[in-house]
Amino acid sequence: MLKYFFYIFALLVVLVVTVAGFRGQKSQKTPIEIFPDMDHQPKVKAQVPSQFFADGRGNREPVPGTVPLGYAMPLHKPIDGSTGESQSPYKQVRFSSGVSYFDTGKMDNKWGTGIPFEVTPELIARGQERYAISCQVCHGATGAGNGIAGKYGLVAIANLNQTRIRDMADGEIFNTITHGKNTMMGYGDRIQVQDRWAIVAYMRALQFSQGGATVNDLPPAERTKLESQNP
Ligand code: HEC
């Protein structure tokens, strides 16, 4: 009886070893695939020829005009309205490539503060326009967090005039625009770098207007105008 058991056992061992093979051994033979899952898919691998395309190459050319993310566009209109090409990186259309303060909002490992180029009335106007396009739907025209998106169910939109955000470094706000924050999505792939800074500059103007600013902060001419209207 025991003899038969031994025979059957030995047979089973041989059977298992034949089908499953020894573990950890390399073989040139195609493995037996009982469940191939999705191991084999018709696809073109990078840098490999292909009979499918007329030119015999598997790789396709990018669509004409494609700009790789992270590169400056060679052709652009300066945002200050001036004509002609500017070589200044601050006037190029670009979407965060380098590690500079201009691209990241960081100085070393800390958030830096200050707009990394000259703040002009045109820049603030540009920021206002970009803010209206990209931020106002949620944060509202005054930054109070009461934009239309709130009425459609978006909750906990930050009030940009709160002390915490007033005290926040410019670089951190720049980074929030680039990468988003919690439920706010990032806009780094659709707002070019210097426009993000223009928005930060405009946000600072908004914050100033929404608290802390007095009539004495107006230029004398504007003040006289206002005072003559409201004596
Ligand atoms: C789709 C709605 C939406 C849009 C558009 C939007 N935000 Fe926000 N934003 C939010 C929400 C929601 C929060 C709060 C996120 C949280 O829970 O911290 C927020 C938070 C912020 C904060 C505070 C971040 C912090 O550290 O607490 C800043 C600054 C800010 N947004 C700036 C902007 C600017 C500038 C724009 C335009 C480029 C913009 N947001 C566009 C929804 C939006």
Image: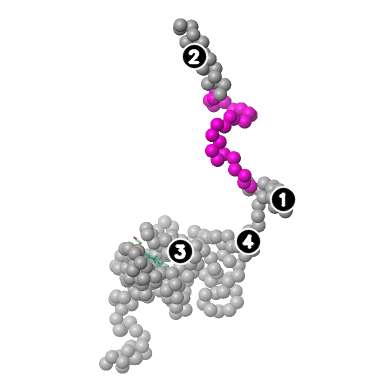
Q: Which mark is residue 56?
A: 1
Residue extent of the magenta highlight: 20-44
**Decide: marks 1, 3 in contact (CB < 8 A)?**
no
Q: Amino acid at mark 4?
A: Val
Asked if ligand 1 lies within 8 A of label 2, the reply is no
Q: Which numbered dot is residue 202?
A: none
Q: CA distance from mark 2 to mark 3?
A: 67 Å
Please name the residue that numbered disc 4 is placed on.
Answer: 63
Q: Report the Cα–Cα distance between label 3 and label 4.
A: 24 Å
Tell us which disc is closer to us: 4 or 2: 2
- Between the residue at mark 4 and the residue at mark 1, the CA separation in whole angstroms equals 18 Å
- Determine the secondary structure under disc 3: loop
Q: CA distance from mark 4 to mark 2?
A: 65 Å
Closer mark to the observer between disc 3 and disc 4 = 4
> In front: mark 1 or mark 2?
2
| Mark 4 or mark 1: whose residue is earlier in sequence | 1
- Name the colouring of the figure: one colour
Provide the residue designation for mark 3: 187
The disc labelled 1 sits on which kind of residue?
Gly
Residue at 55% from the left image edge and 79% from the top image edge: 82
The reply to whether the C-beta atoms of the residues labelled 1 and 2 are less than 8 Å apart is no
Q: Is residue 124 left or right of residue 46?
A: left
Instruction: Give whichever of discs 1 and 2 has the lower sequence position.
Output: 2
**Residue wearing tag 2:** 9
Q: Nearer the viewer, residue 49 or 217?
A: 49
